Image (spheres, rainbow, N blue to C red):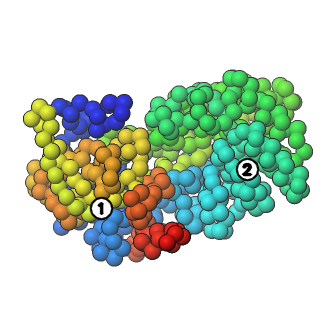
Amino acid sequence: MHVAGAIHADVSTPGPQWLERPVDPNKLDAALWSSSTVRDDDGVISVAGLKVTDAIKQFGSPIYLMDEQDFRQRAREFRDAFEGWTVYYAGKAFLTRTIARWVDEEGLWLDACSHGELITALQAGFDPARIGLHGNNKSVDELATALEAGVGRIIIDSLDELDRIIELCETHDWHARVMVRVTPGVEAHTHDYIATAHEDQKFGFSITNNQAMVAMVRCHYDPHITLSGIHSHIGSQIFDTGGFEVAARRTLKLLSQFTDATGTQLPELDLGGGFGIAYTSQDSPSTPQQLAANLREIVAHEARAYGMIEPKLSIEPGRAIVGPSTMAAYTVGTVKPVDLEGGTQRVYISVDGGMSDNIRPALYAAEYSAVLANRSSQANTMLCRVVGKHCEGGDILVHDVFLPADIHPGDLIAVPASGAYSRSMASNYNHTPRPPVIAVDQGEATVLLRRETMDDLMALDVGK
C-alpha cells in the first residue's frame, strides 16, 4: 500500500491480493457477523430476529444494529476462559449506561479512559471498586471524580499526574489505589497509530531508561497511595501473542527488580488488551480460550524464570467483545463506475454515512467487508469501493469489496464488525448527525443511543 493511503496506490491492479471474488455473493461469512445474523429466503439480512429493512423503516438510515446476546456471550467467554484473572471491558471501544449494565451482569470489570466514560459507568450504577481509570492526561476534575467515588485503580501515566493525585489525597484525605503504566519497548504488529508499547509514543513510563522504576518507588513510599502493580498495553487489533510474551518478560523482570529494591513483591500485572477480530476474510483471530492458554503459559514461564510467585493477572478486551456483535447498515445513494488504468474498472458506491460514523478506514486504512443487505442477487459481482457522503476524497468505508453488478440507489449495504470504535469515534463532520445504536434481542429492538437531530446540533450553536 502507498504510504499516503490506498487511494494513492497503483490503480492498474485494483484490490488487495487477499481479496477473492466470492463464489456466492449472497453467502454470509459467519466469522465476520454476530451469531444471530442470517439472510432469509428473500435475501434480507436480519440480526436477532429483526430484519435490517424493518429496522431502517423504524429508526432510519444509517444505523448500528447490535446483537445483545452475542455481546453477552463474548463477554462470558472471556470471563470463563480467563477464570482466576480479572477481565476489564475496555469502555473506549463502545460504552453506554446499558452496555455498562451488561458488562456488570456478565461478571466483567470496567476500564474507563475519560471523564465521560467514568461518569457513564458511575451513572449506570457500576461498582466503583470494579472500575479502572486510564488516560495519559487526566485532569484534576476527573481524578477527583475517580478518587471521591473510590475507583479500584488509577493507571498512572506521568509524574505530573502522580503529583495531582498526591495533592488531591492530601487535601481531601483520600487514598488512591494505583498501577503504573510502563512501555516495555514492544513493536506490536499493527498500525503505528494503535501500537502503544514502543518507546517513541505518548503512553506510560519507559522501562529501559528507569522512568518506570522511579514512578513505582515514589508510589510505593507515599502514604496516600497503594501501588498494586504495573500495567502494560502493547496495542490494538493484534493477532500474534509473541508481543505479549516479550511484554510479560520485561514487566515481570521489572517487578522482580522492584522486589529487590524495596523488599516488596507487587501483587498485580495487567497485560492490556488489543485482541484482534475478523473484519475481512483475511483475518484469523484467536478464540478467548486460545488466548487464555497462551497467556497463562507465557506468564507462568516468565515468572518461573525470575523465581517469582505469579502475580494476579488482568486483561482488557473491548473490541473482541463488542466489535463482532454489531453491524452498520447504510442506504445506497449513487452508483458510479470509474475507469482505471490498464482497462480495469472500479465502481464507487456512495452511501448515506461515511467517515463521520466510521473514521477507522480514513484514519489508518482499516479494512472492512460489506454485503447487499435488503435482497439477494444472481448478478455477477464487480469490484466496488463503498464511500461516504462527506467532502473528503479519503471518505472511504470499504476500500475494496465485490458486490452484485445490479446494485442500485435505494439498496441497503451492511458492514459487519462495526461495534468497536465506530460510534465511539463518530463525529459531526459536515454537520452530520450521528446514527443511533439499536440493541436487538429476540426480535425486540431497544434504543441504546438515539439518532442525533439537526436540533441537537443547533442547540450547541449559541451564536445568532
Percent x, y of residue 176: 81, 50
Residue at 79%, 47% (x, y): give it. Answer: 164
Label 1 sits on residue = 352
User: Is residue 203 shown above or below 353?
Assistant: above
Label 2 sits on residue = 153
Answer whether residue 61 is visible to the viewer in this image: yes
Amino acid type, callout 2: Arg
Q: In which quarter of the image is the N terminus?
A: top left
**Quarter assignment of residue 375:** bottom left
Q: Which of 189 and 30 is in front in this view?
A: 189
Q: Which of marks 2 and 1 is nearer the N terminus?
A: 2
Helix, strand or loop status at disc 2: strand
**Quarter assignment of residue 377:** bottom left
**Quarter assignment of residue 4:** top left
Residue at 72%, 43% (x, y): give it. Answer: 156
Residue at 14%, 33% (x, y): give it. Answer: 341
Q: How crowded is mark 1: few (under 14 residues within 10 Å), some or many (20 or more)?
A: some
User: Is residue 72 shown above or below 202?
Assistant: below
Q: Locate residue 422 relative to residue 225 in the image: left or right.
A: left
Question: Closer to the camera: disc 2 or disc 1?
Answer: 1
Q: Residue lying farthest front?
A: 464
Q: Locate residue 396 relative to residue 425 in the image: left or right.
A: left
Percent x, y of residue 332: 23, 61
Q: Which of 363 and 280 is in front in this view?
A: 363
Q: Residues within 10 Å of mark 2 (few under 14, many from 20)?
A: many
Amino acid type, callout 1: Asp
Helix, strand or loop status at disc 1: loop
Percent x, y of residue 354: 34, 55
Q: Are marks 2 and 1 in contact (CB under 8 Å)?
A: no
Q: Locate residue 302 relative to residue 351 in the image: left or right.
A: right
